Amino acid sequence: MRIDFKKLKSLPVETENGLLLGHIINLEINLDTFRIEKCEVQDKKWIGTDQQYLISSEQIIKITDEKVIVQENVKKITNKEINKIPVTTSPTPTLNSEMER
């Protein structure tokens, strides 16, 4: 099965017991393997009560056309923790001849 990011973001994320967690708002992708490492899920039920969850790829049980099903033990994250999540980027490769200029 294939799914594009636009469709993936519109799917509800639920636990195995059917508890709605929200929708995917961000993905961390390993550029070496092109594998999703983590998903950030946010629920906006009420203004000011946003809950966010960080879900590893190992916690995802199933993705269907209708929803994403994850394990019960997903971790809620706070705004402070979100700011501490490292953004992993690789520096642009440079030729030695470009560095000598």
Image: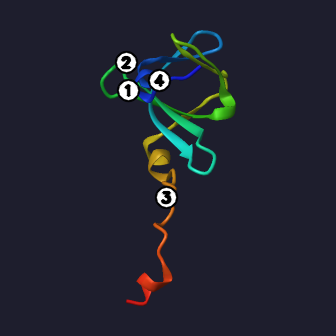
Question: Which quarter of the figure has residue 101?
Answer: bottom left
Q: Residue furthest left?
A: 47
Residue under circle 4?
Answer: 8
Precedes in sequence: disc 3 or disc 4: 4
Q: How far, Cα to Cα, is label 2 from label 1? A: 7 Å
Q: CA distance from mark 3 to mark 1?
A: 31 Å
- Tell me the amino acid under the disc marked 4: Leu
Q: Which residue is mark 2?
A: 45
Q: In the figure, 40 relative to 95: above or below?
A: above
Viewer-proximal residue among 56 and 72: 56
Q: Which residue is mark 3?
A: 89
Label 3 to label 4: alpha-carbon separation: 23 Å
The answer to whether marks 2 and 4 mark residues whose Cβ atoms lie closer than 8 Å is no
Q: Is residue 81 above or below residue 16?
A: below
Q: Residues within 10 Å of mark 3 (few under 14, many from 20)?
A: few
Q: Nearer the viewer, mark 4 or mark 1?
A: 4
Label 1 CA crowd tier, 10 Å (few <14, some 14–19, many 20+):
few
Whether tag 3 and tag 2 are in contact, CB under 8 A, the answer is no
Residue type highlighted by circle 3: Thr
**Which badge, 2 or 4, is on the more N-terminal residue?**
4
On screen, residue 11 above or below 76: above
Above or below, comparing residue 35 to residue 17 in the picture = below
Disc 3/disc 2 C-alpha distance (Å):
33 Å
* Dot label at residue 49: 1
